[in-house]
Image: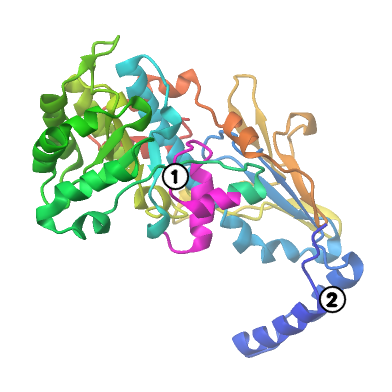
Amino acid sequence: MCPVVTEEKIQEAKVFYQMHFRQNVFDEEGWRKVLEKYDGRLPIRIKAVPEGKIIPRGNVLFTVENTDPDFFWLTNYIETMLVQMWYPITVATISREFKKILAKHLKATSGSLEGLDIKLHDFGYRGVSSQESAALGGAAHLVNFCSTDTVAGLLMAQKYYGCQMAGFSIPAAEHSTIISWGRSREKDAFECLLDQFPSGPVAVVSDSYDIFKACKHIWGDKLKERVMERSEDSALIIRPDSGDPAETLLEVIKILEECFGCSLNSFNYKVLPSYLRIIQGDGIDLNSIDQILEKLSDEGWSAENVFFGCGSALLQKINRDTLNCAFKCSYVETNGKGMDVYKQPVTDPSKGSKRGRLSLRRNSDGLIETVEKGAGKPEEDMLVAVFENGSILQEYTLDEIRKAAQLSEEDLSPSQHNKEDRTLLEIHQKHIMNGVH
């Protein structure tokens, strides 16, 4: 049970809103009734789509209603907090779009999806606006991948979703740990990392001065034997971090091929030796990652060779309008008489809202749709009661959510990754907006 209203909070809010509005608008009596009648628990009911479920855009995701007519005003009070669900919903959706792109290229160039869940690393911790954002966004990414540096997301998954360790990382150099040696000792900096982490994978940022010289003359010459001593389980992962992502990555992989050679996989795509891989973490978004992988495959390289890291494009360069998330009133009762309500601005038809009591179902064609005006059948409703009168009725584990969000064969269809004159980012955003999942 979750009591959230106390006498202390009521008094605090009374003073605060008197100062804020400069007139008496705070409903002290109403909030005290919540305290007295429900012991401070909120008399509302929330029904929601099961977490991890893939729902086309434009459908109802959750409904909120008061369970006591005396507290008709309560639903609007919690709108601002609940509409903030747009953020993890959007991060999880974008992350899943990344996964679809990676899966398509990995399958096309290797015939396998092995390692897909570590192909996109969350680099977004330092780029978000707060610890709370890092936790919510970082946990949302973990629905699709288990590769992250955003510890706040791991802690959230641990605390609320029953997952002791939801994601993993590897030791990795940053620029400060390289440039502290001085430009003339870059080779010594690299070698120190190989000494410090003789087993297990290690990532080394290598563009502090000249990524191409570093790959050719340090990794591919002075430290070549040290690199070749490593194994698949202890791979050196070279990280470019500047320049045009596609051009830089292609040049780097060609230099590494010259120095270390490569082999052909069963699909006749080139693969670097198993002890050597690349991670591209600069300039990655839905558009660039598809372009990079397309160019690699055009040059005969398998997607097996590359990992990606994504920061702001994953956790920060989004807003509530990315997927048009909104919270609207659709039904009211006055003196026991119900009425369907909606908005339909003449100046912007796209802002029209749904009307009446809403439910979600899968229709006879297998498509998910919202049923308006209370016409839905309770036995068909996909919305599940998750909260009522202060009690949490339904919780999910991260394992359950990940299972619900798994990719299907449809997600790998080439038709979902077609090329047109518009940028790939626009294409993918169009698919998200139109509910193509």
Q: Which residue is drawn at 45% across and 31% down?
A: 117
Considering the numbered disc 2 on the image, is that residue within a helix, a strand or a loop?
A: helix
What range of the chain is rendered magenta?
A: 128-156
Q: Residue at x 18, y 30 (%)?
A: 225
Tell whether position 307 is magenta. Answer: no
Please tell me in which quadrant of the rendered image residue 6 appears. bottom right
The residue beneath circle 2 is 32
Check residue 393 in the rendering and tell me which mark sits there, or answer none. Answer: none
Can residue 246 be spotted in the picture?
Answer: yes
Task: Please state, as top left, top right, bottom left or bottom right, where the N terminus lies in the image.
Answer: bottom right
The residue beneath circle 1 is 148
**43 to 207, vertically: above or below:** below
Amino acid type for the residue under numbered disc 2: Arg
| Lower sequence index among marks 2 and 1 | 2
In percent of width and height, residue 304 lies at 31, 24
- Furthest residue to the front? 195
Can residue 352 be spotted in the picture?
Answer: no
CA neighbours of label 1 inside 10 A, class few (<14), some (14 to 19), many (20+): many
Q: Which residue is drawn at 33% across and 40% down?
A: 202
Amino acid type for the residue under numbered disc 1: Thr
Residue contact at pointers 2 and 1, CB within 8 angstroms: no
Q: In this view, does 57 lie to the left or right of 171?
A: right
Q: Which residue is drawn at 25% across and 47% down?
A: 192
Tell whether position 142 is magenta. Answer: yes
Considering the numbered disc 1 on the image, is that residue within a helix, a strand or a loop?
A: loop
